[in-house]
Amino acid sequence: MDSQHGARVTSLARRDPPALGSVTLTGRLESDDAGVVYAGEHDGQQVVVVLLGEGAETDSYGRRRFQEAFQELDAGNGEAIVEFDDDVDIAPWVAVRAGSLEDGLELARGLLAPVTLAHLEPVGEVRGPDFRPHWFRRDGAGRWRLWPLPWPQRLTAGAWWTWVAAFALILAIAAVALWIAIKIFEDSPAPQPGPGPGPGPNPPPSSSSPSPSTTGPTTTTPGPSPDSTGPTITTLRIPPIV
C-alpha cells in the first residue's frame, strides 16, 4: 500500500480491469456508490482514472450526469482529460492528468459527485436517514472492455517474476513427465514369441508329395498261379484312411 500526500493506493480487486484503453491501472484510490477511482500510468505519466460503478452505469440519468460532468471539465480545462470512453455497451470512464494523486483524487470526486447528487445542498432541515441511490448495493466496477489483451504488458510490479516462475514450473513438470515415460518404457519386459500356427485338418497335397494311391499299405494273400504249380500270392490294395 502506497501513499502520496494522503492518497492511499491499494491493490486492484479481482473484478477490476488491468487497463482501460491505453492507460495501465496500478491500484485503487477510492470507491463509492457512484464508481471507482484508480491510479494509473499513461505514456510514463501518472494519471487518475474514474470508472462508473456497476450499479450507476445501469441508470441512464446517472450516466448522463457523469458525461455532463467530464464534458464540463473538458470545456473548462481541455488538457486535464487524457482519454475517455462513453460507449453504451460499457461503463463510461475518463482518465485525467494529476500532478499528485491527492489532486487527481479531488478531481475524480468532483466528477462522481453529480452521479449520486452528492454535490447538491439539502433543501430545508435534514431529518431522517441519508439519501442513497437505488443501486447503492452494487458498488463494484462497471462493465469494461479491454482489447487487445494486455499480455505481456506489465500489470503489476511483480508480474514479470510471476510469468517467469509459471514458465519454469511448466518446464519442470514437462521434464518430469518425459523422464517418467522413458523409465516406464525401459523397465517394461520384451514381448515373448508366441506359438506358430497349428496344422490344418486336411492340408492339400503338394506336387512333390507322393500320390495317395502309392502311399497306402499293401498285403499279400495266397492264390493260384497259372505259371507254377505252387500257390500264387495275389497283392490287394487297401485304400488310405482319410
Image: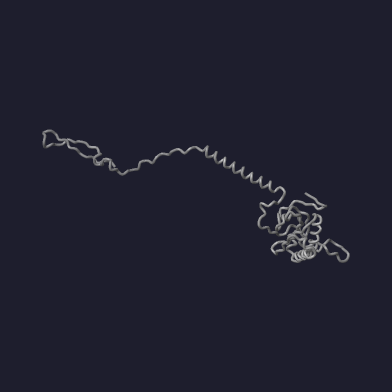
Q: Residue at horizontal 78%, vertical 52%?
A: 9
* Applied colour scheme: one colour
In this orientation, which residue lies closer to the viewer: 111 or 242?
111
In the image: residue 218, left or right of residue 151: left
The x, y position of residue 154, in whole percent, is 69, 51
The x, y position of residue 216, in whole percent, is 25, 39
Q: Residue at horizontal 47%, vertical 39%?
A: 191
Q: Quadrant of the C terminus?
A: top left
In the image: residue 234, left or right of residue 155: left
In this orientation, which residue lies closer to the viewer: 51 or 151?
151
The x, y position of residue 68, in whole percent, is 77, 66
Query: Residue 58 falls in which quadrant of the image?
Result: bottom right
In the image: residue 175, left or right of residue 49: left
In the image: residue 228, left or right of residue 163: left
In this orientation, which residue lies closer to the viewer: 124 or 41?
41
In this orientation, which residue lies closer to the viewer: 174 or 191?
174
Residue furthest toward the top?
230
Q: Is residue 112 above or below residue 215?
A: below
